[in-house]
Amino acid sequence: MAELISITGTHHNPLLPRLFQDPGKHPGIPQAQAAFDELRERLEADRADVLLVVANDHLNEIFLDRMPPFMVGKGRQHAGPFDFESKIYGLARREFPGHPALAEHLVRFGFEWGADLAFSDECTLDHAFMIPLHYLQPDGGIPIVPFFANVMAPPYPPLRRYHAIGRMLADAIRAFPEELRVAVVSSGHLSVEVGGPKPPTAAYDAAFDTEIMRLIEARDLDALFAYATPERMLEAGNMTQAFSTFVLLAGLAGDLPLTYLRHVFMPTSTLPFLRWETEGEAV
Amino acid sequence: MNRYRVDKLLYRLLTDAELEALYARDRAAAVDGAGLEPHEAEAIVAADYASLYTAGVHPFLLWQWAGRIGPDERDRYLGEVAGKGYPSYAS
């Protein structure tokens, strides 16, 4: 049977590659670089056979004409980012083999479990997928299964649903009837405002971010659901729904020990770095 | 304002390089054929961020679009949406 080896969560600010070219500009930059390096080394040591990559499209691949809350990439190949993203962010276009058998299994397992996942046999991966792969899997080659969660277009699933879908994915991976080492790589934001009245330099809420990270560390999801009301999320920033991918990750992690936890304060956002794994000492 | 219709045009302007280039050359021509009502088309041609934001056009699309139009547009955008609160952007 397949094993769920580790779960890594990071940020996907597409400006990071450019920011990292000037590490003296802000004390957070070398801290973030060190966290990515540490998580990359740990992921390499996992010797994973396949990566499940959990992220959110930014209305690039999936638009409002059809908006699945959750979707699995089932194709034989996956590529990204979009050409305009390569141009703007300096992020190279890359290709990864898919893992159609695992992807199909996730969809079928979902039906039995009670979650009907959409699937796609051809999807381009935007920076939310490519930023974590850029830093955590720079040499490529490993098969991936992309998993899309809608955090951009209301109506959104309730936070409990993201968590439940994460639990379902963990059960599904462990029920896959092949010897396969599966690692999860994911990205999201904590509080974030894009296109609202707050300027980018005041567009995040450090108190919200610190509390969310504390509750994830404490595995107190009921307290997290009570804290992160729609009103509190909007107060924290108009696109704060983006932190739902971390709620999904907490569901995937279940009882696994949280073995890495950092949050790096940058001028425009808090960068979270998380890792859960089957073996290792909890932080 | 029909939010979906306006969101759709912004999505096309952001993802279709030819349409983006046409908008840079001839804004009215780029908007023509998108099926917008006259006041919606005018708001896109004028890059009237205040009207579009207040009507609930998706702020992520608006912000990306402002960044594409020109280097100073995001400053103008922030000036226009200041004090406008958080209208629902559900389509």
Image: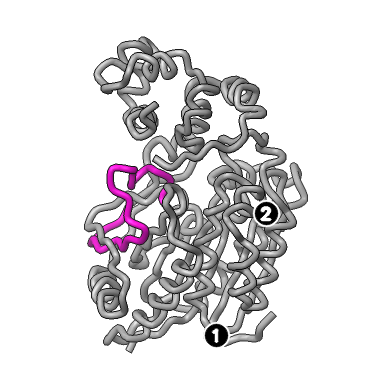
**Magenta portion: prevailing SS class:** loop
Task: Check disc 2 and give the amino acid type.
Answer: Thr
Q: Is residue A21 left or right of residue A102?
A: right
- Residue drawn at the location 62% of the way across and 35% of the way down: B85
- Give the x, y percent position of residue B46: 46, 13
- Distance Cα–Cα, label 1 vs label 2: 25 Å
Query: Which secondary structure, mark 1?
Result: loop
Q: Is residue A169 above or below residue A86?
A: below
Residue B76, image x, y percentages? 61, 20
Look at the image and tell me in which quarter the N terminus of chain B lies. top left
Q: How many neighbours does mark 2 have within 10 angstroms: few (below 14), some (14-19), or many (20 or more)?
A: many
Circle 2 SS class:
strand
Q: Position of residue A107 (x, y in %)?
A: 26, 71
Q: Dot 2 falls on which chain?
A: A
Residue A283, above or below A13: below
The residue closer to the viewer here, A274 or A115, is A115
> In the rendering, which numbered label is found on residue A270?
2
Q: Tell me which label, 1 or 2, sits earlier in the chain.
A: 1
Category of crowding for the residue at label 1, using alpha-carbon neighbours closer than 10 angstroms: few (below 14), some (14–19), many (at least 20) = few
| Residue A215 falls within the magenta-colored stretch | no
**Image height of B20 relative to A255, above or below:** above
Magenta stretch in the rendered image: A57-78
Q: Which chain is disc 1 placed on? A: A
Q: Which residue is mark 1?
A: A255
